Image (cartoon, rainbow, N blue to C red):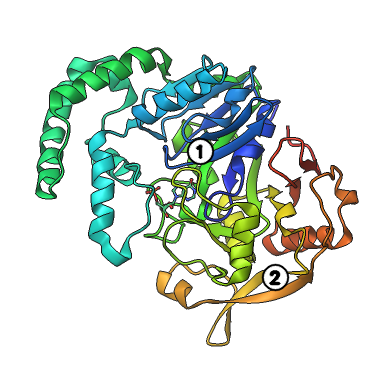
């Protein structure tokens, strides 16, 4: 049975939640391996509409074990409110397992994220202010607390004391107050009571599942161009968002993956600051945003919208080694008389074929567009590729050719059933 990793091809919000929810129907295990509650995955199914931040989208499938693996960072406060929300709607969360090696996002991380953003002034990254950057920074600096520490609070308190003192002092200098140490320890005690029983060495569970030929779906967070190595640095998140990140992020052995599925949106969006060559600051961008309701699941911020960027898409296919694609939100383009695709960039009339690593270069890039005819017919009711209007099929084929990856799934609406499966993956 296959193992499959699902990653966003552009700047996140490509619709991974829906795709993972669909794949999870036939999965034995669904694993989150990076990021934290900065992620926002929307899932709409017969149980309702859910905005998930930490819990894997497989939680709605009774047969699937759900894992939050070691590469993630977890704010226990957010995790508990997410579990409360799910349980209040009757969703069974007893199949959730959490890595003992995932790092904890604590109140000082959240405060520091906000303060660092303010200090950046006009160069602010536009983070979600969930404390993600400071948590990963502490992990690398070896100052972090891990979920496993909740199981030995006495030892944790000893280690946390020094870190707490330096964070408290730093926050004080910024005029910010941290909850007292004892109150923080009391909170950790309360988290341990509820979350403690879920904490385990998830890498062992995952590798055992693969040994037993189970179907395992790895759910990436954010998008390739927000990757801390290969994204539009420094306007990125602080973790790995790409498919190869699943190896350290879940304790997976090399060569364990059968499918690397990239999720592409039929147009491009971005939240936060940083370059986006195809951004439309005109009424067309506004039209896409309104039609598609492009507002962040985590922060509610309006997303920047533009035409499909195939240069960035091609780079993403290369970096991730994608062998399959899912194209989402095709229906959003149903009414456009014509649709543009960015096939290359240019600087002062000179072509730039590859996605530039330098931010200065990328900021100077102007998109070169190809214009394709629109189909001006509704698509949400269609279930077979051959039934799509000819222009819609031509659009999909053109994107496949430009990015170099076959689209095996096409989403034509937010609901599970509003999907065209071109070729089954699981
Ligand atoms: P952080 O991850 O909160 O540090 O934010 C860093 C950048 O990543 C900002 O531009 C955020 O808007 C962006 N970002 C973080 N999570 C997501 C997501 O789930 N979707 C889209 N953008 C995200």
Name the side, left or right, on which 117 lies relative to 201: left
> Residue 383 appears at what percent x and percent y?
84, 42
Q: Which of 282 and 345 is in front in this view?
A: 282
Q: Give the mark nearer the N terminus: 2 vs 1.
A: 1
- Crowding at label 2, few (<14), some or many (≥20) Cα neighbours within 10 Å? some
How far, Cα to Cα, is label 2 from label 1?
34 Å
Q: Residue furthest bottom?
A: 349
Q: Quadrant of the N terminus?
A: top right
- Crowding at label 1, few (<14), some or many (≥20) Cα neighbours within 10 Å? many
For the residues labelled 2 and 1, say whether their Cβ atoms are less than 8 Å apart.
no
> Residue 267 appears at what percent x and percent y?
65, 60
Disc 1 secondary structure class: helix
In the picture, residue 199 is in which quadrant? Answer: top left
Q: Which of 47 and 74 is in front in this view?
A: 47
Identify the residue at image location x=25%, y=56%: 118
Q: Quadrant of the C terminus?
A: top right
Residue 311 against residue 165 in the figure, above or below: below
- Residue 302 in view (yes/no): yes
Checking the image for residue 420, the label placed there is none
Identify the residue at image location x=35%, y=27%: 76
The residue under label 1 is 246
Name the side, left or right, on which 308 lies relative to 35: right
> Residue 291 appears at what percent x and percent y?
65, 56
Disc 2 secondary structure class: strand
Residue 312 against residue 102 in the figure, above or below: below
Name the side, left or right, on which 315 lies relative to 117: right
The residue under label 2 is 340
């Amino acid at each position: 049975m296959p193992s499959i990793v699902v990653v966003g091809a552009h700047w996140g919000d490509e619709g991974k939640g829906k795709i993972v929810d669909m794949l999870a129907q036939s999965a034995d295990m669904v694993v989150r391996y990076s990021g934290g509650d900065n992620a926002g995955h929307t899932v709409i199914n017969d149980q309702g509409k859910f905005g998930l931040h930490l819990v894997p989208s497989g939680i709605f499938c009774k047969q699937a074990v759900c894992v939050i693996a070691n590469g993630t960072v977890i704010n226990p406060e957010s995790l508990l409110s997410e579990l409360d929300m799910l349980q209040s709607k009757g969703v069974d969360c007893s199949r959730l397992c959490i890595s003992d090696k995932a790092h904890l996002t604590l109140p000082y991380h959240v405060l520091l994220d906000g303060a660092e953003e303010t200090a950046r002034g006009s160069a602010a990254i536009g983070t979600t202010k969930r404390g993600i950057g400071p948590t990963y920074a502490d992990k690398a600096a070896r100052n972090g607390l891990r979920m496993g520490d909740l199981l030995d609070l006495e030892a944790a308190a000893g280690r946390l004391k020094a870190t707490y003192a330096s964070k408290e002092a730093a926050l004080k200098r910024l005029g910010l107050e941290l909850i007292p140490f004892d109150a923080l320890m009391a909170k950790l005690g309360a988290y341990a009571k509820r979350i403690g029983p879920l904490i385990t060495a998830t890498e062992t569970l995952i590798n055992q599942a693969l040994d037993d030929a189970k179907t395992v779906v790895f759910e990436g967070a954010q998008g390739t161009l927000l990757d801390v190595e290969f994204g539009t640095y420094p306007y990125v998140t602080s973790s790995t968002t790409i498919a190869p990140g699943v190896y350290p992020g879940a304790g997976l052995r090399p060569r364990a993956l059968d499918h690397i599925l990239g999720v592409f949106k039929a147009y491009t969006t971005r939240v936060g600051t940083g370059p986006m060559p195809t951004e439309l600051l005109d009424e067309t961008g506004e039209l896409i945003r309104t039609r598609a309701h492009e507002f962040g699941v985590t922060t509610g911020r309006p997303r920047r919208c533009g035409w499909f960027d195939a240069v960035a898409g091609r780079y993403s296919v290369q970096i991730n080694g994608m062998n399959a694609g899912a194209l989402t939100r095709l229906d959003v383009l149903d009414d456009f008389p014509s649709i543009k695709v960015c096939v290359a960039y240019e600087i002062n009339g000179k072509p730039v074929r590859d996605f530039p690593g330098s931010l200065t270069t990328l900021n100077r890039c102007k998109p070169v567009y190809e214009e394709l005819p629109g189909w001006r017919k509704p698509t949400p009711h269609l279930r077979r590729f051959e039934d799509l209007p000819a222009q819609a099929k031509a659009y999909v084929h053109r994107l496949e050719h430009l990015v170099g990856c076959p689209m095996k799934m096409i989403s034509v609406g937010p609901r599970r059933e509003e999907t065209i499966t071109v070729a089954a993956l699981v």
